Amino acid sequence: MRRNTFIVPLAMLLFLALSAAAAVAQEVTPEVAYNRLFTEPIQAEWFSSDILAQISVDDWEEIVAQFAALLGRFERVEQTGPINYNLIFEQGRMESQLALGPDGKIIGIWFNAPELTVGSLDGAVEEFDELPGKVSLLVIKDQAVLAARNEHEPLAVGSAFKLAILAALKDLVAAGVLAWDNVVTLEAGDKSLPTGMLQDWPEGTALTLETLAALMISISDNTATDALLRVVGRELVEQYAPRNVPFLSTREVFTLNNPDNAELLAAFRAGDVAEKRALLTQLAEAQLPHPGVFTEPPKAMDVEWHFSTFELANLIFYVHDLPLMSINPGLAS
């Protein structure tokens, strides 16, 4: 099979914290977990509450449908490491990592970019054009655009927004305002919901900026992200995200999506930029919701981070030379 350069829908790239609990003996094997995920109706009991807080059953159904539209029928699982697997489909393959809890529920899962068994980039783009929903695509090699679809249309991009924070941090380091080895301590307001691991670390833990950035990018750590946003400053990040003003932390997005905060959400939606900034104080005072409140699909889909693939391509080009970007290389040529 020959690999070809292509890009997948922005929402398809997921990274949820993996755990050593995968080694615990369990009745549900990874093979069983993958097979039922891609061949049976999705069931909530397959997932831990932390996973469902991030991705609802309805979202999983959409994700699996997108993979099926791109890769065809699921065929088999090939284990390549302790938690590493190749997922073989009718029209391609995909690397994945999986961790199961002692009860057999999925507590961590990650998918790499799918590899299509097509003979050309044109063939890959044709397959991409058949995907359901809104799609955006931009393929660049050696600074030359090879393919593009709706590359200037903003879409909700999930954790890809973290590239803007990294870009702003790189600016401050280059200007001598900050240094990668500067040490900051975790504050209560930094604590967010998973993905990540720092939400379980104590307040006052000392971490370098480089460590926080590495965790933000390599495992999509939300608490590391919010700590960096606090240090770098919201306004500087907004220079890379002018349609995302005020630029929200992950904690703030979770808080606004909490059903108990319906009035706060309505006020935020109705407010202008100045009024929204004023509401950030109330958001900071609100209690972080329990992951269990997110068993249903999020109601505030507009309270997200919106970028075009063109903007994301520029961001990743700017930060691609940072050593921490190689920890989890993501898309590969």
Image (tube, grey):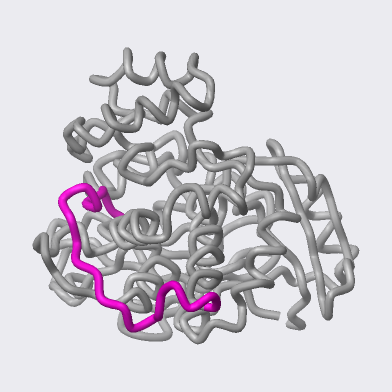
Left or right placement of residue 179 versus residue 237 in this view: left
Q: Position of residue 177 (x, y in %)?
A: 44, 72
Please provide the residue range marked out in magenta.
Answer: 174-194
Residue 283 quadrant:
top left
Left or right placement of residue 169 versus residue 116 in this view: left
Q: Residue at x 31, y 58 (%)?
A: 227
Residue 185 located within the stretch drawn in magenta:
yes
Left or right placement of residue 94 versus residue 202 in this view: right
Q: Nearer the viewer, residue 308 or 204?
A: 204
Q: Position of residue 248 (x, y in %)?
A: 43, 41
Q: Nearer the viewer, residue 302 or 174?
A: 174
- The quarter of the picture where the C terminus appears is bottom right
Residue 30 quadrant:
bottom left
Residue 218 located within the stretch drawn in magenta:
no
Q: Is residue 160 above or below residue 274?
A: below
Can you see residue 101?
yes
Magenta stretch mostly in which secondary structure? Answer: loop
Q: Position of residue 181 (x, y in %)?
A: 33, 83
Count the marks: how many?
0
Q: Residue at x 44, y 34 (%)?
A: 58
Q: Is residue 174 above or below residue 287?
A: below
Q: Nearer the viewer, residue 307 or 183?
A: 183
- The quarter of the picture where the N terminus appears is bottom right
Q: Residue at x 71, y 38 (%)?
A: 134
